[in-house]
Amino acid sequence: AAGVDWQKPVDTPLFLCYNTWRNLKVMSVKMMLLKTGELVIADASEVVHEEKVRGYMMKEPQIVIAEEKSLLMEEDGSNSNYELDIILKPWLILSKDKEFVITADLVATICDPLDSIAEMYDAKVNPTPVSETEVV
């Protein structure tokens, strides 16, 4: 394009996610409810610029799907319990990338997952290799 000055740096808001990698703050494994309605679990870090959280870096994010398995009722009917099947599937499954940056305004809330869900996530993204001696 004629008249474009390629030496001029990109404005901060457009380049924010890429020039602030060094300003990541540790968060660890978190569950995020996105404004799109997706529930995502990931090893997440805050992306901070000028002392303000601008977004989140998610490593190997997984969509959390919870489906009701069955309804168990006691004889008197006053106490009922339910069980859930939890499924983790990759977020943006068709991407070869493992790390994603999302802007802070896309996140509705962030919380710590239940220990069992965090363990499930860890087992999925960090599978234990099976050594040849263990294979029968």
Image (tube, rainbow, N blue to C red):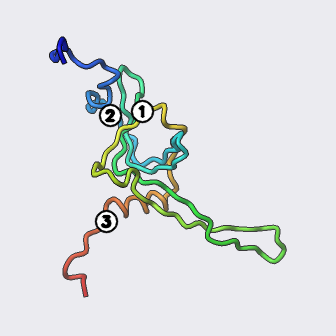
Q: Is residue 51 left or right of residue 22?
A: right
Q: Residue at x 49, y 62 (%)?
A: 116
Residue 2 lies in quadrant: top left
Residue 72 location (% of width, % of height): 71, 73
Give, as a three-letter code, the residue at label 3.
Pro
Q: Secondary structure at mark 1?
A: strand
Tag of residue 127:
3
The residue under label 2 is 24
Crowd rating for badge 1 (residues with CA inside 10 Å; few <14, some 14–19, many 20+): some
Give, as a three-letter code, the residue at label 2.
Leu
Give, as a three-letter code, the residue at label 1.
Thr
Tag of residue 103:
1
Front label number (1 vs 3):
1
Residue 83 location (% of width, % of height): 62, 68
Q: Is residue 73 left or right of residue 25?
A: right
Q: Is residue 32 left or right of residue 83?
A: left
In the rendered image of this protein, does residue 109 appear above or below residue 19?
A: below
Residue 21 location (% of width, % of height): 27, 33
- Nearer to the camera, 110 or 99: 99
- Of mark 1 and mark 3, the one earlier in the sequence is 1
Outermost residue on the right side: it is 76
Q: Residue at x 26, y 27 (%)?
A: 19
Tag of residue 61:
none
Q: Residue at x 39, y 56 (%)?
A: 90
Image quadrant containing the N terminus: top left
